[in-house]
Structure formats: C-alpha cells, structure tokens
Image (cartoon, rainbow, N blue to C red):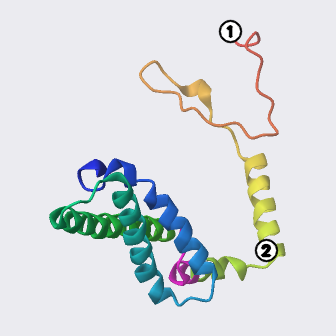
Amino acid sequence: MDFSKYILPELLLLIPVLWVIGYVIKKSKVADEKIPLILFACGIMLAGLWIICQTSLTTSQQWGMAIFSAITQGILCAGTAIGADQVLKQATKTTSTDEQLIAQAAAPLMAIPADTIKNVQEAIQVAIKNADPPDTNTATDNTVTPVVATPVDTPVPDSTEIK
C-alpha cells in the first residue's frame, strides 16, 4: 500500500514517534481508554507544528487548509501507529483459551506413569529385536522385493559383500 497517497511522506516519521509516545504512556498510570485520544492529540499537534513551519500562512484560506491538514494528517499518523501496535499485539498474543486447550489435550498423557512408558519402550525394542526378516529368496522376476528397515542392532552389510 502506498501511504504517500494519504499521509505526507515527510510526516511518516510521526508513526514510530507516536508509537513510542503510546508505549511510554502505556507504562505510566494513564487509563488504556485514554491512550488513543492522547495519541490523536499529539499527532495533530506534531503534524500542525510541521505544517506551520513548512508553509507561509498569509491568508485565512491558507490557515484553514493548514488546520485541516494538521487534523487529518495527525489522525492518520496516530491511527496507523495505534493500528500497527494492535496488529503486533494480536500476532504475538496467546489466549488463555489456547493454553486451556493445550492443557486439556496433554492431560491424558501426563496421567501415564513413567514406568508404564518405560515398559512400552522396552516392549517395542524387544519386538524389533525378535522380528523375523522377510524371506527375500522367494521373490520372482514378476514381484517386487519389499524394502524393510533394518533394526538398529542389525549391522548393515558392506556394499562389497553384495554380489
């Protein structure tokens, strides 16, 4: 999106400045509901200061245009700073609902005693060790020989031994 269509390129610097001002205000004891209003007021004042310094205001029409530009540019910059802050918060936020769902899903696993898990692991290892490898000598030219993973304890033959 081309912000220069809506916000003057020179005033784009106000967005991170207003974000920092909002961050400082958030750390103070100001109520959260008042922070956007304070940022809008700061944005209007800072944009107005820049516009007044950059233009020669001799007629009432120029003053009216400067005031209008300060208000709209200040609101746009403050709104962008507030919106960007909210997007960042929502993107990094984990809700208590997510944590509850994870806890509910993990609860059955947490109830399994450690000795049961160890017994299951040992049973799997014994089953792998005692498994009979498939008979590959019975394969004919029309059948496909199955590829079976060898257990970890079985050494893999060297390629020079295979003929």
Q: Amino acid at mark 2?
A: Thr
Picture quadrant of residue 87 = bottom left
Q: What is the span of residues highlighted in magenta in the rendered image?
A: 91-102
Q: Secondary structure at mark 2?
A: helix
| Frontmost residue, 29 versus 151 | 29
**For residue 28, above or below residue 143:** below
Question: Residue 24 appears at what percent x and percent y?
Answer: 60, 74
77 relative to 99 in the view: left or right: left
Question: Residue 104 appears at what percent x and percent y?
Answer: 58, 83
127 relative to 54 in the view: left or right: right
74 relative to 24 in the view: left or right: left
Let me know if residue 101 is in the magenta part: yes
Q: Residues within 10 Å of mark 2 (few under 14, many from 20)?
A: few
Question: Residue 56 appears at what percent x and percent y?
Answer: 29, 54
**Residue sitting at the far front:** 58
What secondary structure predominates along the stretch shown in magenta? helix
Residue 116's label in the rendered image is 2
The residue sitting at 65% across, 37% down in the picture is 149
Picture quadrant of residue 108 = bottom right
Q: Amino acid at mark 1?
A: Lys
Q: CA distance from mark 1 to mark 2?
A: 45 Å
Picture quadrant of residue 20 = bottom right
| Frontmost residue, 62 versus 139 | 62
Q: Earlier in the sequence, mark 1 or mark 2?
A: 2
Question: Residue 2 appears at what percent x and percent y?
Answer: 28, 47
Q: Is residue 1 visible?
A: no
From the image, tell me which residue sits under label 1. Answer: 163
The residue sitting at 80% across, 35% down in the picture is 154
Callout in the foreground (1, 2)? 2
The residue sitting at 32% across, 65% down in the picture is 76
